[in-house]
Image: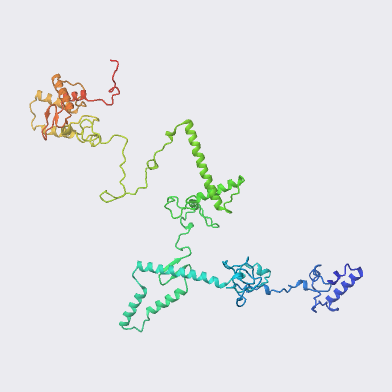
């Protein structure tokens, strides 16, 4: 059948005879076909395999088109390369015609000469003629032309090994020096001391030598590293290169099925498994915390910028050229800030209101700073700057009306009232009466009155004294009445008031202290002065009412 294609289209009779011959060959009654090499062709081979294509058909039955052609692969050997630097014999003695004018070699011209340009070439001097190079014609095959390592000298890679070995040896030496500085225990010295001590003692044949076992263990430990770690027996340092098995898995942090969902396929847990623990203090706060913390938001903004720029027709791609995208994003941010500042300046210049944009420092707004302060047990500042005490908006440590303590410094448990600790007065903005006020408050207390009344009762009923009972009733009314000094209907002596006004003006004019002089009389040590109604009225008449809105008013028309 293969030969029929070379003769053209077969007639009906020839096609029938060819079919009969093929059937006879398959039945074994006719001899099988033979190719040009004398090899028998199996008659059961299908026609689409036995028939050669038109560009390989020779006109005879053959299966050579199904076999790999035998090419000359001598040129594909990797060792077939140029002999670099090879010279052809000794150099010439004199210059030859047509040679290089610079070095004198015949194998190249002056334009292609690789020697240093001479001041006077070999053509004119005839000296120092370079030997001729060996011109090689290396026939490279298809594979040899495309082999990137063809002609590479493997000995060159030995230099890389030596360089890395030198670096590793220097690093090992530095590590040993650091360990020697940290600890004074030398394993070799300890072993020597142990051997010397055992040599002096009597050997025990029942037990083996532990030193020999340790040496064998160290020897085999250096040869076989443990799985997941690199053990150096000389320095006793273990470097792990796998995940530590003691680490708790994500799905074991919280076994509550209602906690954060764990996806076993992607091994991700987006939410925080422990909601009660703050994210900053938790060992694992979920992938979402890592995704939105650190530099992750910056990368997301950069990716969003690249997408928006690409949608507008700009050639920006985050993965293809990340450096270009980063530079363009920085330039975009800078121009955006400039545009925002210019817009803000133009609006403020047109409408004003710059004073309303000024804000207090962040330290004052948030109430915290980065200043570190360390105190001792006694409360003194040991390190850092002492923080200023927080002050209220009200006036502090301001004593009014001759008081030496502030309002609210004293509390009366029986009545539940607050007052001044200097005079035990429970009336706000009252005048201080000093120690006399404290004694009066004690005497007017309900307990003292009950105690005094029980002591005054005689064993036998006394005769009624109309005058004494009236004075006692009047005194009780004064003590238990709500009227205080200077309140209600007050009877004031005009002469005493005039004298008190004169003494008050004199005291204010001279600027003397109230404790040194009151009403023109010096106070002795331990002496208490009772304030009279006239003196209190003189003080009220001469004091300045700062809360009066008309205090500073002056009528200019008068």
In percent of the image, x 43 and y 70: which residue is there?
232
* Colouring scheme applied when the structure was drawn: rainbow
Instruction: Tell me: residue 454, above or below residue 80.
Output: above
Q: Image quadrant for the N terminus?
A: bottom right
Q: Nearer the viewer, residue 537 or 41?
A: 41
Instruction: Tell me: residue 360, above or below residue 281.
Output: above
Q: In the image, 464: left or right of 419?
A: left
Is residue 412 among the parts visible in the rendering? Answer: no
Residue 431 in which image quadrant:
top left
Is residue 292 among the parts visible in the rendering? Answer: yes
Q: How many marks?
A: 0
In this view, the residue farthest toward the front is 124
Q: In the image, 301: left or right of 501?
A: right
Q: In the image, 347: left or right of 76?
A: left
Q: Position of residue 129 (x, y in %)?
A: 59, 73
Q: Position of residue 327 (x, y in %)?
A: 53, 49
Q: Nearer the viewer, residue 67 or 149?
A: 149
Q: Image quadrant for the C terminus?
A: top left
In this view, the residue farthest toward the right is 13
Q: Position of residue 280 (x, y in %)?
A: 43, 51
In percent of the image, x 54 and y 57: which residue is there?
266
In this view, the residue farthest toward the top is 558
Q: Position of residue 504 (x, y in %)?
A: 17, 25
Residue 206 in which image quadrant:
bottom left
Q: Nearer the viewer, residue 379 or 372?
A: 372
In percent of the image, x 55 and y 53: which residue is there?
322
Q: In the image, 15: left or right of 404?
A: right
């Amino acid at each position: 059948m293969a030969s029929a294609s070379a003769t053209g289209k077969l007639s009906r009779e020839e096609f029938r005879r060819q079919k009969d011959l093929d059937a006879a060959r398959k039945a074994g009654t006719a001899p099988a076909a033979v190719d040009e090499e004398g090899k028998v062709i199996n008659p059961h081979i299908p026609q689409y395999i036995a028939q050669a294509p038109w560009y390989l058909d020779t006109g005879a039955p053959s299966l050579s088109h199904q076999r790999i052609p035998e090419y000359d692969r001598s040129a594909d050997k990797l060792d077939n390369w140029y002999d670099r630097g090879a010279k052809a014999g000794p150099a010439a003695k004199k210059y030859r015609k047509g040679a290089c004018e610079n070095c004198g070699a015949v194998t190249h011209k002056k334009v292609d000469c690789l020697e240093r340009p001479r001041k006077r070439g070999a053509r004119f001097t005839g000296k120092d003629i370079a030997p001729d190079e060996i011109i090689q014609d290396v026939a490279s095959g298809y594979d040899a032309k495309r082999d990137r390592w063809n002609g590479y000298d493997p000995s060159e890679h030995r230099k890389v090994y030596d360089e890395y070995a030198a670096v590793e040896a220097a690093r090992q030496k530095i590590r040993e020096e650091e360990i020697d500085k940290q600890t004074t225990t030398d394993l070799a010295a300890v072993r020597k001391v142990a051997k010397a001590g055992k040599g002096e003692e009597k050997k025990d044949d029942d037990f083996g030598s532990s030193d020999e076992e340790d040496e064998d263990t160290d020897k085999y430990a250096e040869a076989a590293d443990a799985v997941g770690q690199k053990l150096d027996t000389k320095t006793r340092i273990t470097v792990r290169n796998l995940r530590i098995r003691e680490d708790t898995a994500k799905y074991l942090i919280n076994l509550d099925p209602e906690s954060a969902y764990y996806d076993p396929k992607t091994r991700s847990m987006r939410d925080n498994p422990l909601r009660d623990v703050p994210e900053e203090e938790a060992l694992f706060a979920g992938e979402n915390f890592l995704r939105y913390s650190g530099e992750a938001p910056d990368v997301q903004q950069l990716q969003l910028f690249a997408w928006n720029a690409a949608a507008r027709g700009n050639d920006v791609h985050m993965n293809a050229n990340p450096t270009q995208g980063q530079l363009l994003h920085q330039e975009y941010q800078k121009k955006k800030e400039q545009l925002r500042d210019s817009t803000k300046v133009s609006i403020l210049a047109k409408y004003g209101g710059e004073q309303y944009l000024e804000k207090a420092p962040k330290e004052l707004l948030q109430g915290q700073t980065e200043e570190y302060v360390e105190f001792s047990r006694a409360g003194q500042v040991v390190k850092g700057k002492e923080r200023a005490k927080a002050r209220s908006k009200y006036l502090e440590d301001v004593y009014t009306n001759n008081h030496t303590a502030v309002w609210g410094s004293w509390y009366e448990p029986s009545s539940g009232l607050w007052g001044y600790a200097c005079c035990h007065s429970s009336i706000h903005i009252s005048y201080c009466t000093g120690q006399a006020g404290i004694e009066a408050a004690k005497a007017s207390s309900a307990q003292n009155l009950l105690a005094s009344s029980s002591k005054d009762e005689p064993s036998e009923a006394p005769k009624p004294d109309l005058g004494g009972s009236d004075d006692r009733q009047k005194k009780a009314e004064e003590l238990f009445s709500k009227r205080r000094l200077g309140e209600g209907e007050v009877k004031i002596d005009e002469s005493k008031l005039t004298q008190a006004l004169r003494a008050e003006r004199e005291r204010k004019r001279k600027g003397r202290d109230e404790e040194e002089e009151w009403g023109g009389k010096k106070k002795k040590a331990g002496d208490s002065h009772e304030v009279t109604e006239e003196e209190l009225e003189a003080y009220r008449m001469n004091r300045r009412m700062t809360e009066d809105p008309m205090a500073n008013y002056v009528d200019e028309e008068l």
